[in-house]
Amino acid sequence: MRVLIVEDDPLLGDALAAGLRQLGHVVDWFRDGARADAALAGAEYDAVVLDLGLPGGDGMQWLARWRAGKRHEVPVLILTARDGVEDRIAGLDAGADDYLVKPITVDELAARLRALARRRSGRSTAVWEHGALGFEPAARRVTWQGRPVDLTARELALLEALMANPGRILSKAQLQEKLYDWGESLESNTLEVHVHHLRRKLARDVVRTVRGVGYALGAALGSDES
């Protein structure tokens, strides 16, 4: 999951970003709404964690801007010190998908983000299944034909992106955004290497190549072909 954190507190922002990365997520962190707005315009995120007390504009203003524009579908979780009932109501009515009051643990934040991802993808269960393939996002655990499979963090992120979009072809650029932080450099064939490793560890039919377009989740029927 690629997450955008908008938080001006350097200690909290750094802790949240580091904690989510340790759990296997790709995270971009900005301290003001303007930079976050530019990031949203240039990349596809699975969720935004938004503080309300931001320099250069209140978080509610940025939320209203995103809901009125092209970024209206991205799930937004408000994380703020404003704990009044009226504040919660205003945030949710303005378009937030969830509202949390500080302080918060990284584990609870991650659980809330997983819930948002499940709702967005239409998956209601804790374990995602596709043919012989099983993926448990909370535990970052993958099984193939009932047996556990050890994947790297990048391979897990790639598989998660594909399984979250079972009927969709994702371009190379879209998948790279799910795997790498803002501004992180990568080799031109890096994605192809991850796809190759995923097929080798699972099966060739797990990832389908759509020539000239990108990649999609394959049949995953348990073929023994390499």
Image (tube, rainbow, N blue to C red):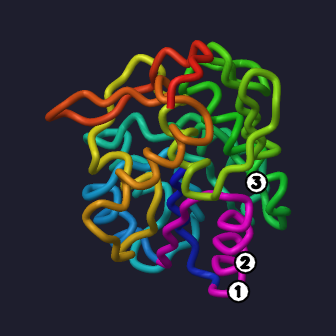
Tag 3 near tag 1, CB within 8 Å: no
Quarter residue 50 falls in: bottom right
Q: Left or right: 210 with respect to 23?
A: left
Q: Secondary structure at mark 2?
A: helix
Q: Residue furthest front?
A: 225
**CA separation, marks 2 and 1?**
6 Å
> For the residue marked with disc 3, what is the amino acid?
Leu
Provide the residue designation for mark 2. Answer: 15
**Marking on residue 11:** 1
Of residue 187 and residue 136, the one placed in the foreground of this image is 187
Provide the residue designation for mark 3. Answer: 109
Magenta highlight range: 10-31
Q: Left or right: 41 with respect to 139?
A: left
Please say whether residue 22 is one of the residues in the magenta stretch. yes
**CA separation, marks 2 and 3?**
12 Å
Vertical order, 126 against 108 (above or below): above
Q: Residue furthest left?
A: 212
**CA separation, marks 3 and 1?**
16 Å
Residue at screen point 36% across, 48% down: 44
